[in-house]
Image (cartoon, rainbow, N blue to C red):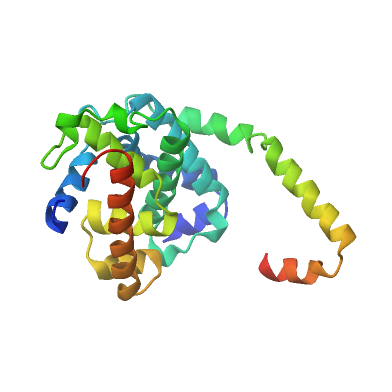
Amino acid sequence: MELLEQFVRGDLDAFETVFRQLQPEVYRWIVRIVRDPAAAEDLTIETFWRVYRARARFDPERGLAPWARRIATHVAFSHLKTARPEVSLTRDVPEDRAGAGSTGEAVHSAIRLAFAGLPPKLRDVAVLALIEERPYAEVGETLGISVGAVKSRQFRAVRLLRKKLRRLGVEP
Amino acid sequence: MKDDNEFRDLLREAFQPPANAEPGPDLWPRMLRRLDRGETRRPWLDWVLAAVAVAWMVVFPEVIPSLMYHL
């Protein structure tokens, strides 16, 4: 806890310790989203810059890792939205790979793009509950919302993802 | 259409870690350079929005308390 208090006060040594502890996890998470190691390094730096800049708003009771992870999620998906999309139009998804049962890279790219287009509140829940398979109670605690709200947002996220995927030519 | 469980499996597959996902170089020196650089330049749109907000408050000063409340 003392380390986190020093970090919140702006101590650079404490920030370096935090950085070295969390960097591998943050980097691995970002590269899972953007699939580009070079971009993931830049986005890791950007994530920790935002973590450092917003340190005064950090709540030590909630843990630094989940907070950094949420910031990394926003940074990575924002990058996906602005970078040249791997799959942008229906015609980019080959017909034989877009149907039911297909798990080709084009479909996976479409899924990541669809995630990038979700509203942040729904995306945070979808990432934690659907991708990470964290229990609803833990997701609620991490995001500061009730279990009911987690379930509701997950339901809306799934519905919206299916809709977005259909627009990208993928039958979800 | 896939059922919910199949759809969730598909979502998880899309976010599987790629091979060689470990960060190569030590990123701390780059982090220090980023800290030295500080804030990046604000996009021009931010300046336009700020100018519009200031002009709005000059023309309609009664909105200032409401704006302060929401900030």
Q: Is residue B13 left or right of residue B69?
A: left
At a point 41% along the width and 36% down the height, the residue shown is A80
At a point 18% along the width and 42% down the height, the residue shown is B13
Q: Nearer the viewer, residue A39 or B53?
A: B53
Quick check: A87 above or below A115?
above
| Tally of numbered discs | 0
At a point 34% along the width and 34% down the height, the residue shown is A34
Q: Give the image location of residue A48, x and y in percent.
A: 47, 42
Q: Give the image location of residue B26, x and y in percent.
A: 38, 28
Q: Nearer the viewer, residue A163 or B28?
A: A163
Q: Quadrant of residue A141?
A: bottom left
Q: Is residue B54 left or right of residue A127?
A: right
Q: Quadrant of the N terminus of chain A?
A: bottom left
Q: Quadrant of residue A101?
A: top left
Please say whether residue A111 is visible from this viewpoint.
yes
Q: Nearer the viewer, residue A167 or A52?
A: A167
Please say whether residue A32 is visible from this viewpoint.
no
Q: Give the image location of residue A63, x and y in percent.
A: 38, 60
